[in-house]
Image: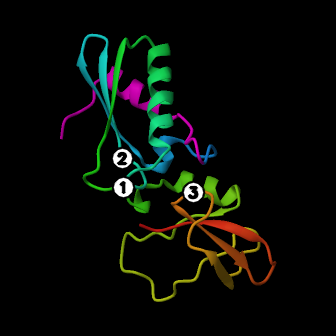
Amino acid sequence: MVTATPLEAELMELAGAVPDPEMPMVSLAELGVLRGVHLVGPGRVQVELTPTYTGCPAIETMSSDIEQVLHERGIAEVEVRTVLSPPWSTDAITAEGRRKLAEAGIAPPRDMGGPVPVTLAIRCPHCGSTETTLLSRFSSTACKALRRCDSCREPFDHFKEL
């Protein structure tokens, strides 16, 4: 494993702090879509992004926002590459990202890092009930589903597990 230079680490932190354009309560680092920032020459960097879905329409905005932040830092040439392998999964969302999603009323994806749980219940981010109903497999974005809590009757987005 190659160790990042201090400048690469700084640029990674700057790029990682960029908010996701569809869910601005989480940063690209918290969402786990920023894969790397590499110096490729004087004043030149290459940034690697993995979208949550292949063909995600937000990837262009993410790239533009990263380019702007790194240009403001003095980097003359920024190339943002889309990297599809290994694919992004919801396991890449940080604990802080999951907390922020729940705080914003979006049920975060369940941690699928181990065996698939026997219960597939989705917890309501408003009242905590696991009695929820799927209203639509797709919500405001392709990576979320629309659900309603059967207890408090509030609708909410659920970030789907991948």
Q: Indicate whether 18 appears above or below 108.
A: above
Q: Residues within 10 Å of mark 1 (few under 14, many from 20)?
A: many
Q: What amino acid does circle 1 point to? A: Trp
Give the residue drawn at x 26%, y 54%.
86
**Is 96 displayed left or right of 102 in the figure?**
left
Badges 3 and 1: C-beta atoms under 8 Å apart? no
The residue to which callout 1 is attached is 88
N-terminal of the two: label 3 or label 1? 1
Badges 2 and 1: C-beta atoms under 8 Å apart? yes
Q: Secondary structure at mark 2?
A: loop
Residue 13, position as x, y percentages in the image: 45, 31
Q: Nearer the viewer, mark 3 or mark 2?
A: 3
The residue to which callout 3 is attached is 141
The residue to which callout 2 is attached is 50
Quadrant for residue 20, please give it. top right
Q: Which stretch appears magenta?
A: 1-22
Q: Residues within 10 Å of mark 3 (few under 14, many from 20)?
A: some
